[in-house]
Every structure is written in C-alpha cells, then in structure tokens.
C-alpha cells in the first residue's frame, strides 16, 4: 500500500514540484508575527473592533493677524473628551511652530557641506542665517475657572498636568493664549508662510499648524507625542471648531469650514455671487473679482474685520488671507450633497488659476468620492501660494504660477493640476481616513498619489501622467539608497520616490496586475468606509484588503512594504518540443523515458536557444497499470495523446533575480504574427523563490516570448525578459557560419 501510494503521488507531483527549493526565504509565509496581534479595538479582519474608541477635541478660538509685522495672536478654549478606558493624568499638545524657533532641532540635526561657491540663499538656509524668530510664545494655560495650569514644554510638545485625573467618559476644558511670528516663505519654506509682493506692497498668508493642537491618544501607542522634526507631518484627533479670524478689513479669507457671517464680511454683490455659485454646477462663479482685488491692493485698510468659520468633525483647521485674493466657486454634485469647490488666488496666478484650479478641485472630489466615500464636507478650497503643496481639512495650498506676462509651459500647467488634485485628495487621506503621517507616511501620501493618478488619467487623458505608474518607478528601483516603505517618516531618504511613488505604484500594481480592478476597488472602498473618521494603522489596511477580496496578499505586503527587494525576472531557457507521430502501444511495457520526454521528469540534455533549430521530439507512452493504485478503471491514454498531437510544447525556465516575488506575465508571439498575454499568479514562486520551470502547450508555433510586456511590474532589467535574445541570436548565427 505504501508503495502504490508513493507511485501515485510521484505521478501527480512531478509537474508541480519539478525543482528543488533553493535559498528559501519564506516570501509567502503569513505576516503573523510582523503584524500586531488583533484585539477588541482592532479586529483581525482589519475593521475597527467592537470596543474601538477615539478621543475628541473641540476648539473655540479667536485669532488676529497683524499685517504690519506678520504675526499671529490667538486665544482659545479646548474641550477634550476622554473616550478611552484609561485615566489621564496629563495631556499632550503639539507645538509645531517650535520647530522654527532659533534653537530648533531641525537645524541642529541637519547635515551640511560647503562648496567653493554656493548661492547665498542656499547657504543661508543650510546655516540658518535668517533673522527670523519663530516658535510659539505661550502666554497662558488656564483651567476653566481661569486658574493657571502647570505645563512643561518639551520642544514641539507641551504637557499639561491636570489638577484632577481625567477619568474615562469625562471631558476637560482649558484655555491657552499664544502668539508667533509668521515665516517668510521666500526664506524659510514651511507648510505655512507669508509671501510679500513688492510690486504692490501687499502680503498673502497661508496659515497652518498655527495653534496648540491636541495630540492623538489611542489604543495603539497611548500619547502620539513623537517630536516634529520637519518631515513627518502629523496626526490629530477629530473635533468641532469655531474660529473667529480678525484680519484687515479689505482681506478675503478662505478657511476650513463654513463661513458663518458672510453678510458682515462680503458686499451685497459678493453675497449674491456666492449664492449663485451654490447652484452653479458647470463653471466657477467669481465671487471676488480681479478688478476688486486690484482695487483692494491699493486701499490697504487699517480697520479690521472678523470672519467666523465653523467646522464639524475635522482633524485640523487652517486658513488663508490676503487683500490680493480673487475668489471663485462652483457647486459639485456628490451623492445628495452639493459641496462648493473654491479657489483663492492673487492676480499673479492668472490666467492659469481662473481656468484650472476650481475645475481640478471638482475633478478630485468626484473621482475620489467614487473610489472611497462621498465627500462629506461643505467646501473644498484650493489656495495659490508660491512653491506650496500642503493639505488641511477642506483647504489646501498649491503652487503653479505663470510667468509675469501670463504665459506658462505645459509642464507648469500639468504640475499645477497635479498638485491641486493631490492636495484636495488629501481631504480623504489623511483628513477623513485619519492615519498617522508622523509614523507612517505612505498611508496617506502613497494612497493619495495612487488616487491622484487615477483622477488624472480619467479627467486629463490628454496629458502624459507617469507618477505612480510602475513603469515610471524603474529608475528608482534600479538605484541604491532605498528604504522599505515601512520606515518612519523622519528616516526616509528618497521621500517622494518611496512614500509617494513606490507606494502608489504598489497599489496600481495590485489593482492592475494582482487583484484585478473589481476586487481591488471593492476592498479599497471597504477600507475607506471602515476607517472614515477613524484612525487606521498599516495592519488595518493590509488585513482589510485581504478580508474583502479573498486574495492572500501577505507576500505582497512583505515584499513591497517591508523590504527593498526589486523585481527582476528573466527568461533563462526555452525548449521547444513536439510529440512523436508514432505512438507506443499497451504491449510496449518497459519503454525507457527518452530525452525530452514530458513523462520522464528529467530535463532534456539538448538546449534550444533559439527557435530556428526546430522542435525536439518527445514520446508519450501508455500509463503503467501500477500508476492506478486502487482505482479499477483506467484513463484513455489515446485521448491524452490526441490532445498533444501536433501541438507546440514549450518548457520555459524563469528566474527571479531581484528577490521580489510578483506575478509572471508572459506575452507569446506566434508565427502568424498574433500575440497572447498569459498571467500567472505570484504563487508560482512559492516553492522555489528563485527559479521555476513550466511547460506550456500551444496550438501555434511561437517565435518570440516577452516577460512583463506592458511594463507592469517595475522589472529593473528588461533585457533578459525577451527570448530569443536579439544579440545572442545573431552571435550564435555567427558561430554557426564560422563552423561551416
Ligand atoms: Zn501629499
């Protein structure tokens, strides 16, 4: 019995396990120990668990901009809700502005070199030679009764010690007064800045990370109080904001949230235009015109006006203000909501901005809403600021300025559309699906760059978009200086190539080449819905994508996210066979397996390095009765033989030189000129991760084989993806000529 079973398994197993596993690295093993253990807060399915909780922070703030000396003065009351099961003795707040203080750590840890000649601006930046005194000045921290609260500032973090511990289910209110000097974007490029326009002597401001913001406290790491060093952005709890912004009376303000006192800050004509924009879906309505803006540039009013904005369920609040702003808006239909897509820009942005900005906002809202969740907020704003590309809830700051005479290159326009789609897209990741950028950047930058590409390809097909496509990633994948995607933001070297482009290309590959569009889109939407207005971690994404699709992707997460392995598949050998015409009979019991026999399990001795040598013959022999084991019936050997009669049989040997396991995509070109693309799942590498051999049966004669013909896999060496190799074929031909 043992013997019969052995024979039986031998017969069926020889095709699948034709090669010995070599240098096995467990590339298909489950990520078990690598991912955090699921618990009642975060389920093994990747969904929030039954006891998932998150904190909430509401803000009521007053802020005044001083346009004379470019400073911000603010005061506010924060109400913090402890929904956690933990008792909190202290609270942590982020003071991002402190990363711009004269004594800042960013400059201290910056490595610098000197050249024999350098631009003054570069050296001033490298050595921090600016006369700029940034950083928060915290005037007071008080409890609800107005009593000073003990607090300690550790660089970009402030700890407030509570008089009574904050028990689960309770809230605490406290107030803070602060001020700081705004940085000139020309010198210190930060996510927030002012820009001075010497022609008319005015400023425009994009103001962000401008108030002490509550840190995230969660089930995953307690207080997320990792210091801000400049690269890793931030994570914040959701909450409601009521903010009054006082600016010169001739300023126009765009901000997170709904404008609550339009009647007090806009003219009758502007109010009417704003009303009209709310029902205009085909093109932007200009609310503050360029003529009005040019007029305001001259008035330079000293009086002040206060603009009031309310925002619900947002993770931050930012605003932009200038007397130079032109403002346009149009309604966008998203489900049963009609949010306003809006743009604020100085005349220096035209004609590009009046033509393209609000349109790009609309395109982003529509496409992202389809792939994720319907855009839930009342407005989405794009503000023009020089050399900016930064996102906040409902508002983002974007570059793309034409030349002085209004002309611009196609690249300028493409860059401007790209950045607006990208920054508006950030409303979804990380503003709504609230991942922690300071720890894991790809979760919003990569995911967002991927959706940005889908939006661009769909809405701007006339432009050649490449970022986020696997084919565009090849030069990066060929180079060194790589870090795994699962690297903390501050340690990333090739920030744009890795956290943006590589992560995006990975998702693009999953959708196009691994999971297929339907399964990917369903799973991705599931992730977006599960984690909208919550705080997901990488494992929640990895698990949800598998949970919703039945595709085991641990090998993909392992290779693409946790290593720097690259894809380099090659065709090592191709052998062409045809079955012999004369067939063996049942009497022919002890037929010896011949070289080239499919049944022999041994590899043929002769190599077929090109197709010109013609096929090698092989024989099928009748099945030895011992192969049937306990079965009483027999298969029809002749029928099997008939299936192979006159067929072209190819034995192809491939190797995985880069280490990364990915699907094998083969393009067959036949003698009649037709082509066929065959897709083999990555699991072909599961036994032998470096070398596989597989037999293919083709009706037609093959003249050419190409791996990854559509450049889907980031294969770093396309040279060895082709058979026969053009160069090799000709040199072989030369050898042949010499010999004869
Ligand atoms: Zn981004």
Image: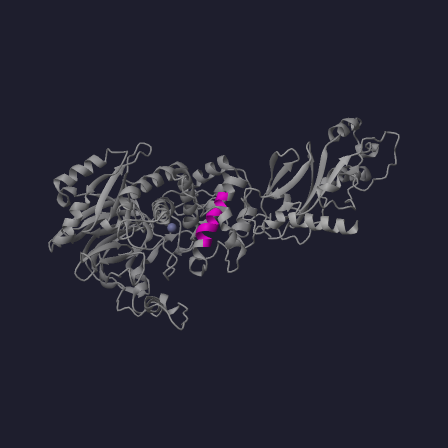
307 is within the stretch colored magenta: no
**Residue 147 in sight here:** yes
Q: Nearer the viewer, residue 600 or 170?
A: 600
In the rendered view, does 121 fall on the left or right side of 260? Answer: right
Q: Residue 502: x and y, percent?
A: 48, 50
Residue at the extreme bottom of the image, as rendered: 116
In the rendered view, does 55 fall on the left or right side of 629? Answer: left
116 relative to 539, above or below: below
498 is within the stretch colored magenta: yes
136 relative to 533, above or below: below
Q: Residue at x 40, y 69 (%)?
A: 112
The picture quadrant where one finds residue 178 is bottom left
Q: Nearer the viewer, residue 526 or 468?
A: 468
Report the predominant secondary structure element of the magenta stretch.
Answer: helix
In the rendered view, does 340 fall on the left or right side of 535? Answer: left
**Residue 38 in sight here:** no
Image label count: 0
The picture quadrant where one finds residue 8 is top right
**Image quadrant in which the N terminus is located:** top right
Q: Residue 153: x and y, percent?
A: 30, 65
Q: Residue 593: x and y, percent?
A: 83, 40
Task: Look at the image and name its color scheme.
Answer: one colour
Magenta residues span 497-508
Q: Residue 154: x and y, percent?
A: 33, 65
């Amino acid at each position: 019995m043992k013997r019969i079973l052995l024979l039986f398994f031998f017969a069926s197993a020889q095709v699948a396990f034709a090669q010995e596993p070599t240098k096995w690295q467990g590339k298909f093993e489950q990520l078990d120990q690598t991912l955090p253990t699921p618990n009642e807060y975060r389920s093994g399915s990747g969904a929030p668990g039954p006891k998932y909780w998150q904190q909430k922070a509401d803000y009521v703030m007053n802020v005044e901009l001083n346009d004379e000396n470019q400073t911000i003065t603010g005061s506010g009351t924060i109400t913090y809700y402890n929904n956690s099961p933990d008792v909190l003795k202290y609270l942590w707040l982020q003071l991002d502005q402190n990363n711009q203080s004269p004594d800042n750590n960013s400059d201290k840890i910056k490595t610098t070199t000197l050249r024999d000649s350098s631009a003054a601006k570069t050296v001033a930046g490298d050595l921090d030679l600016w006369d700029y005194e940034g950083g928060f000045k915290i005037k007071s921290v008080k409890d609800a009764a107005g009593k000073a609260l003990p607090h300690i500032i550790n660089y970009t973090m402030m700890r407030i010690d509570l008089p009574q511990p904050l028990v689960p289910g309770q809230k605490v209110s406290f107030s803070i007064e602060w001020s700081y000097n705004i940085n000139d974007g020309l010198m210190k490029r930060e996510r927030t800045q002012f820009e001075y326009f010497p022609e008319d002597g005015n400023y425009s401001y994009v103001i962000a990370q401008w108030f002490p913001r509550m840190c995230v406290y969660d089930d995953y790491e307690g207080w997320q109080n990792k210091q801000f060093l400049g690269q890793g952005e931030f994570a914040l709890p959701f909450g409601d904001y009521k903010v009054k912004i006082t600016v010169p009376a001739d300023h126009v303000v765009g901000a997170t949230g709904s404008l609550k006192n339009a009647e007090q800050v806009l003219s009758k004509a502007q109010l009417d235009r704003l009303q009209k924009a709310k029902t205009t879906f085909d093109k932007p309505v200009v609310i503050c015109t360029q003529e009005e803006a040019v007029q305001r540039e001259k008035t330079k009013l000293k009086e002040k006006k206060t603009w009031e904005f309310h925002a619900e369920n947002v993770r931050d609040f930012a605003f932009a203000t200038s007397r130079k702003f032109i403002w346009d808006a149009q309604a966008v239909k998203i489900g049963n909501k009609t949010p306003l897509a809006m743009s604020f820009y100085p005349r220096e942005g035209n004609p590009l901005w009046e033509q393209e900005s609000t349109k790009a906002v609309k395109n982003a809202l529509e496409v992202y809403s389809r792939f994720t969740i319907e855009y839930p907020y009342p407005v989405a704003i794009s503000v023009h600021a020089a050399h900016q590309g930064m996102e906040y809830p409902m508002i983002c700051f974007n570059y793309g300025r034409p030349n002085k005479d209004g002309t611009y290159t196609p690249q300028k326009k493409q860059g401007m559309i790209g950045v607006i789609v990208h920054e508006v897209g950030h409303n979804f990741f990380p503003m709504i699906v609230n991942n922690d950028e300071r720890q894991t950047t790809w979760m919003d930058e990569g995911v967002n760059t991927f959706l940005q590409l889908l939006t661009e390809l769909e809405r701007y097909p006339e432009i050649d978009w490449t970022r986020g496509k696997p084919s565009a990633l090849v030069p990066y994948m060929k180079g060194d200086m790589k870090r795994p995607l699962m690297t903390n933001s501050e340690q990333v070297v090739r920030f744009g190539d890795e956290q943006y482009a590589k992560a995006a290309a990975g998702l693009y590959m999953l959708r196009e080449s691994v999971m297929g569009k339907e399964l990917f889109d369903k799973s991705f939407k599931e992730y977006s819905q599960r984690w909208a207005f919550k705080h997901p971690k990488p494992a929640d994404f990895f698990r949800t994508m598998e949970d919703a699709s039945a595709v085991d992707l641990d090998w993909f997460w392992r290779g693409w996210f946790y290593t720097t392995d690259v894809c380099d598949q090659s065709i090592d050998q191709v052998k062409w066979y045809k079955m012999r015409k004369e067939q063996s009979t049942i009497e022919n019991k002890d037929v010896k397996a011949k070289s080239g026999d499919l049944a022999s399990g041994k590899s043929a001795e002769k190599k077929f390095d090109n197709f010109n040598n013609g096929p090698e013959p092989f024989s099928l022999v009748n099945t030895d009765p011992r192969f049937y084991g306990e079965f009483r019936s027999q298969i029809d050997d002749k029928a099997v033989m008939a299936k192979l009669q006159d067929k072209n049989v190819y034995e192809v040997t491939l190797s995985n030189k880069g280490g990364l396991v990915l699907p094998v995509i083969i393009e067959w070109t036949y003698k009649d000129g037709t082509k066929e693309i065959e897709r083999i799942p990555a699991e072909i590498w599961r036994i032998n991760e470096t070398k596989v051999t597989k037999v293919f049966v083709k009706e037609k004669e093959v003249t050419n084989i190409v791996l990854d013909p559509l450049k889907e896999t980031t294969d770093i060496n396309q040279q060895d993806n082709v058979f026969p190799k053009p160069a090799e074929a000709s040199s072989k031909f030369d050898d042949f000529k010499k010999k004869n």
